[in-house]
Amino acid sequence: MPRTETRSGVDWRPGAELETLKLRALLLARVREYFVRQGVLEVDTPLLSRGATTDPAIESCSSIYRVAGSQQAIPLYLQTSPEFFMKRLLAAGSGPIYQFCHVFRNGESGRRHNPEFMLLEWYRPGFGMQAMMDEVDALMTEVLEGLAEYSPARRVRYRQWFLDETGLDPWRDTVPTFRRFAETRLPSVPDGMPENDLDPWLDLLVSHWLEPRLGAGAVFVHDYPVSQASLAQVRTGEEQSAERFELYFNGMELANGFHELADGEEQLLRFEKDNTRRTDNRQAPMPIDHALIAALEQGLPDCSGVAIGFDRLLMATTGMADIDRAMAFSLNRV
């Protein structure tokens, strides 16, 4: 085997072993075979956009395009998800679509995070949230056959998940109640946690209290708080909730799915509220993708969509603890 370092001391080799790269290729092929049989079209969308995500929990990577022969400089953003472009295709009549794509999240690194990673994302016109969870189960069962044990995921509502594991109710309890729980149960609480925004406290307990207690197997958590609807429809009634779900497999978050919001006016309002929250949090507001809003106003078919972190899928399949081993070249190797 070649030496891992040159005379300069640089480790040039990939993080993933050859067998891991072969497994990645096998999973890619199996996913494509599944969608071919289902009649879902593979598409390809740009990495760069004039709009960016406004979500306060996500930071975009930016770039500057300098127009040849002029002094004009256009700010562009690397996609955090292909969602906006894919919805424009859906509004144009594409029918069911999927893609594998590289996406980018600024400031994210760690054993389960790399600033550049691969998503498998797809959209199904005519599917509600439950039907989309059914298809995720079907795809996972088929793709992981002979590689990992996967049974249809049990399903739990977000509110019930919190009540069962913490006794706290995200629909009724307030920030001071969540603060007391976090300060007495967690080793530490990050500095600067807000006093008037519950969502960061919910996210803190999900990542540091609830997720570590999931154990082996697959779980869908669904019906999220309205404040976390993002691009999902909101179910009205006695208990309003967002028609959003996440899939956990062997304790790792793999997928995020929505029954997609098709109301352009409501989506614009949510983006504007996101930017207000960003300003309140001393984050820079982000440019809204008005091409998406125009597509929604033209007419998005009733549909559901989901994104699966492909590198994490490989980690959960093999039991890898570090994303560096699931991809050829993570950030510390580029």
Image: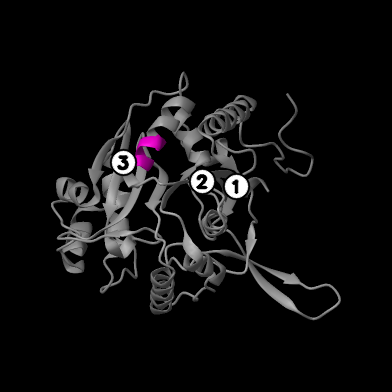
The front one of 245 and 124 is 124
For badge 1, the amino acid type reads: Cys
Of pointers 1 and 3, the one earlier in the residue sequence? 1
252 in relation to 302, above or below: above
Mark 2, residue position = 121
Residue 203 image offset from top left, x and y in percent:
32, 57
| Residue identified by numbered label 3 | 220
Question: Quadrant of residue 269 in the image?
Answer: bottom left
Q: Is residue 286 left or right of residue 238?
A: right
Q: Is residue 87 above or below residue 118?
A: below
Depth check, front residue: 64 or 133: 133
Q: Is residue 251 magenta?
A: no
Residue extent of the magenta highlight: 131-136
Give the residue displayed 62% in from the left and 26% down from the top. 22
Question: In this view of the protein, which residue sits in the foreground, 168 or 331?
Answer: 168
Q: Secondary structure at mark 3?
A: strand
Circle 1 residue: 101
